[in-house]
Amino acid sequence: MQRLAPALRDDEVPLDLISLIKTILAATKEISFRVSQAHLGGLMGSTLDENIQGEIQKKLDVVANELFKDILLESGFVKAISSEEEDTSVAGEEHGKFIVSFDPLDGSSNIEINSLIGTIFSIHYADPDLAANDPDQFKQAGTKQCCAGYVLYGPSTMLVMTTGKGTHLYVLDRTHGGYLLVERNMQIPQDTQEFAINMSNQRHWQAPMQQYIADLLKGEEGPRGKNFNMRWIAAMVGDIHRLLCRGGIFTYPTDNKNPDKPYKLRLMYEANPMAFLVEQAGGLAVTSEGRIMDIDPTDIHQRVEVIMGSKNEVEQCLSYYK
Ligand code: F6P
Ligand code: MN
């Protein structure tokens, strides 16, 4: 098994980006420890605060955000950060070469049940012509990411990351405290019999998604001629990890539950980094109208429809929208 930095050098990742990645991973090791000790350290439950998206923050959301933010801003590499838990972008080092968007703890409703949660991050090069405190720094499409990844705090702490040369899987080896490469170039099988969607929203979906899922549920007797299994971890990071490991389709489609909020997942720190990982592993990552990574962002917290996973299955789903 190969250690992190030599593996990144094999992919010809620039040294300053390797340094930033190591900084990010230092934060995730501490978050991993805090997560494992949450009960013992009095970190279960919610704060009394809401984030800008109107979600009550969990104590661990806040701790993970502070840790990640501080470590990035102190590193000297980072010009600005944006986080699910910060109302606006936060300026860092004026000459920092990178900007980082992150979800410090995705799937936080899983905290209290000791189930899967993780940290998602997305890195772009900073625009040297814009000031560190200019939020326009973040108006860069997903195609411009130079690195994206997530760390999953599960039975093992795992890192899945891409710098644009394949999606690789690393495991945190607690005996020496570093991430080791365990699978180079993960490949999502092109076909699948597994789907992930929150079925409780079924009545709120648009007609094409209603029809697509109805056809999956008909199984062998239906138009697809095969049975499908359903999985829902309720943490995007866990659901995407499953489809990177063994295929599947994951979607959080447009719904009309709340007309002001037709989408659930956030472009900059959920959809884009996962889209980069999925595409680098041979999968597709789209909305019903086009490729996720081609979207020009207008706001750091903007939400987007998400359909991603096994190539042939995503194409099947899209065919219902034509
Ligand atoms: O961050 C949003 C999120 O927690 C995702 O990780 C997850 O896929 C989704 O929300 C779960 O939503 P629901 O409440 O519909 O299960
Ligand atoms: Mn999230």
Image (cartoon, rainbow, N blue to C red):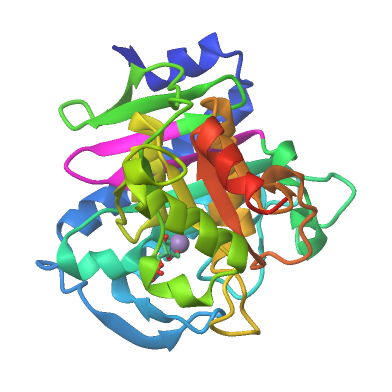
Q: In the displayed image of the protein, which residue is found farthest to the front?
A: 221
Indicate the quadrant containing the N terminus: top left, top right, bottom left or bottom right: top left
Residue 203, how many percent across, how many down?
Answer: 47, 76
* Rendered-image quarter of ligand 1: bottom left
The residue at 52%/47% (across/down) is: 121
Residue 185, how many percent across, how many down?
Answer: 46, 18
Is 147 inside the magenta-drawn segment? Answer: yes
Is 259 inside the magenta-drawn segment? Answer: no
The part of the chain drawn in magenta is 146-160
The residue at 57%/73% (across/down) is: 255
Can residue 134 be seen by looking at this rendering? no
The residue at 15%/59% (across/down) is: 37
Which residue is at the front of the view, 231 or 299?
Answer: 231
Residue 40 position by quadrant: bottom left
Q: Looking at the image, how many numbered discs can be counted on the residues?
A: 0
Which residue is at the front of the view, 296 or 73?
Answer: 296
